[in-house]
Image (cartoon, rainbow, N blue to C red):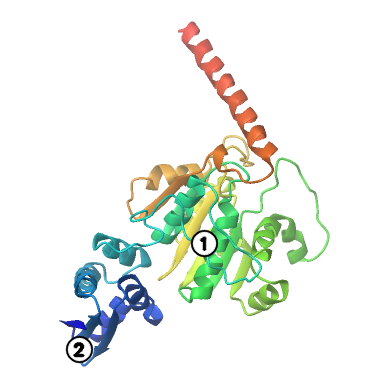
Amino acid sequence: MTEATLSITNPDEILTLFGPRDQHLRKLRRLFDVRITQRDGRIRISGEGEEDVQRATRTLEKLRHLSRQKGELSPGDIDVAACEEGAIVVGTGKGLGHSTDEIDIQHAGRRIKPRTPGQDEYVKAIRAHDLTFATGPAGCGKTYLAVATAVEALRAGSIRKIVLVRPAVEAGESLGFLPGDLRAKLNPYLRPLMDALGEMVDYDQARNLMEQDVIEVIPLAYMRGRTLNDAFIILDEAQNTTVAQMKMFLTRMGERSKMVVSGDATQQDLPRGVTSGLRDAIRRLGKINAIGIVKLQASDIVRHRLVQKIVEAYEDLEQRQQNSAHGDQSERR
């Protein structure tokens, strides 16, 4: 048995290092196969392998230094520091092949796993970043995989609440006045998120979680003025947000929260001349290293085989029209 110790006398520093409900501590124990305990201002790292103990100790030292700089630590910080010491961490892209582990939704009848390299990259980005943007055509799993990783995080205890958000924008046609109360009026807009959730959580359980406010499905307008801590927040159909709405949404993120923003830039239903908040946000924030940005392709579509051919046909026509327009402009010059 090999052992090492670190001296930390500040209780707040220990809380930051170990994470909420010791989630950072549990991850480090699992990654390095060591025991980590704390008593009287001393952290004790022990294990059968000397190298494992040394790597875990170096990782803790890095995280202590980082916590002093930032005042907090995110799950992504733990992953990066552990990977630098050779740990194999799902979600960082280091030490992995082409396939991410299954998404553990703890549902006996469902096995969820990325089915394409693009989907694999998407799940890794979500796990490694507190904020992830994803764009791509219909059917490539943007919503489904985001909801699955949210359920996984809830089951693991790393978050306390799932918030599913969608802008209430009609898809190119006016539906008029819908009958019923507010919930009935909003149901058509929020139904896709509920469909994805329904494949991962039993109906009765999902209803109970919603009644307990553990799972919340709301239109984007209801996010204003809120701060969400310990939450996994998903914004679906984000191409239909305005710039102001996107800024409002992104600034709702609280402590120990994670956000996924997804959309299909080719299916925008905003009024003509209105800039998409999704496009604008990716352009503004794309150079921030702590933010994940994934662009899924037609090859990532996992619906009926015809869907991929349909998307490709539309993209080909749009590309030819753009090339023709550029050619006409060149001739006029």
Secondary structure of the residue carrying numbered label 1:
loop
Amino acid carrying label 1: it is Glu
Task: Specify the quadrant of the image occupied by residue 322.
Answer: top right
Q: Residues within 10 Å of mark 1 (few under 14, many from 20)?
A: few
Q: Which residue is mark 2?
A: 41
Which image quarter holds the C terminus? top left
Residue that appears at 39% across and 59% down: 128
Q: Position of residue 42 (x, y in %)?
A: 19, 87
Which callout, 2 or 1, points to the residue nearer the camera? Answer: 1
Q: Is residue 73 left or right of residue 172?
A: left
Q: Is residue 3 above or below residue 73?
A: below
In the rendered structure, are the residues bearing label 2 and label 1 in contact, judged by CB atoms less than 8 Å apart?
no
Q: Is residue 237 visible?
A: yes
Q: Residue furthest toward the bottom? A: 40
Q: Is residue 146 above or below residue 33?
A: above
Which mark sits nearer the N-terminus, 2 or 1?
A: 2
Amino acid carrying label 2: it is Gly
Residue that appears at 43% across and 49% down: 98
Task: Specify the quadrant of the image occupied by residue 144.
Answer: bottom right
Q: Which residue is mark 1?
A: 102
Q: Is residue 243 visible?
A: no
Secondary structure of the residue carrying numbered label 2:
loop
The residue closer to the viewer here, 272 or 313, is: 313
Q: Residue furthest toward the right? A: 179
Residue that appears at 71% across and 40% down: 172
Residue that appears at 51% across and 43% down: 296
Q: Position of residue 34 (x, y in %)?
A: 29, 78
Q: Is residue 94 left or right of residue 162?
A: left
Q: Position of residue 198 (x, y in %)?
A: 68, 65
Q: Position of residue 118 (x, y in %)?
A: 49, 46
